[in-house]
Image (spheres, helix red, strand yellow):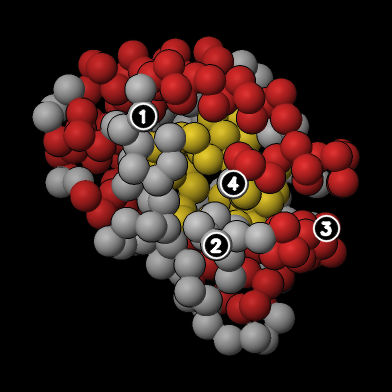
Amino acid sequence: MDDSKIYSMVDHTLLAATSTWEGIVSLCDEAILYKTASVCIPPSFIKRVHDKYGDAINICTVIGFPLGYSSLEAKQQEIIQAIDDGASELDVVINIGDAKDKNFDKITFELTALKKSAGEKILKVIIECCYLEEDEKIALCKCVTESGADYIKTSTGFGTGGATLEDIKLFKAHIGSNVAIKAAGGMRNREDFIAFINEGCTRLGTSSAVKVLSGGGPGVY
């Protein structure tokens, strides 16, 4: 697999609390140079990036991030603002407490409402696998499928663990045909990127693709 195919599936990511405009610009310039699928950036930078780069870059952002326990109304407003500012893709964190309480109908209701707010924009649902038991992951595959969301995503990259191939295999067995898979966190080298793509992921959330593929060393997210 050549590097260009890997880059085409990468959401080139900078979500650290210490993210600066200089860092965001560097991220965006790399994304354009290497033709990544998108940049995934904090909501506060969306408008500034859109004003600077226009249609030259596909903007992804995060909603209810990273803990997921914002109210439905707050998440809806984040989505509306993000789209108004120029985002085309929205990665939303579920209410993980609802999952632990087995309140999956509530999660489906929330995700359905959020997909309605997102409209034609891509909605990716982060379930944060590191905090979940297998039966909870399976139930959440059903929630994501029934909601009409576009992707199920493994992780925020800020939890206790990142993507695993075992979780991708579990997703494939339980999601509907309308749902794609994004892996995030835990990918350290080119071989990891290829393994997740070969297992069925069509997006990789990582800050490390350019560093890894250009020979700069192992990644950290």
Residue located beneath label 3 in the image:
32
Q: Secondary structure at mark 2?
A: loop
Contact, CB < 8 Å: mark 1 with mark 3?
no
| Dot in front, 2 or 1 | 2
Residue 182 image position (x, y, % from top left): 49, 48
Say whether disc 1 or disc 4 marks the residue closer to the N-terminus: 4
Say whether disc 2 or disc 1 marks the residue closer to the N-terminus: 2
| Dot in front, 2 or 3 | 2
Residue 199 image position (x, y, % from top left): 45, 56
Dot 3: within a 10 Å radius of its alpha carbon, few (fewer than 14), some, or many (20 or more) residues? some
In the picture, measured across the screen, residue 72 lies left or right of residue 101, that is right
Say whether disc 4 or disc 2 marks the residue closer to the N-terminus: 2
Q: Residue at x 42, y 58 (%)?
A: 157
Which amino acid does the dot numbered 4 rest on?
Pro
| Alpha carbon distance from label 4 to label 2 | 11 Å
Residue located beneath label 2 in the image:
18
Dot 1: within a 10 Å radius of its alpha carbon, few (fewer than 14), some, or many (20 or more) residues? some
Residue located beneath label 4 in the image:
42
Vertical position of residue 144 compared to residue 155: above or below = above
Which amino acid does the dot numbered 1 rest on?
Ser
| Dot in front, 1 or 3 | 1
Which amino acid does the dot numbered 3 rest on?
Ile
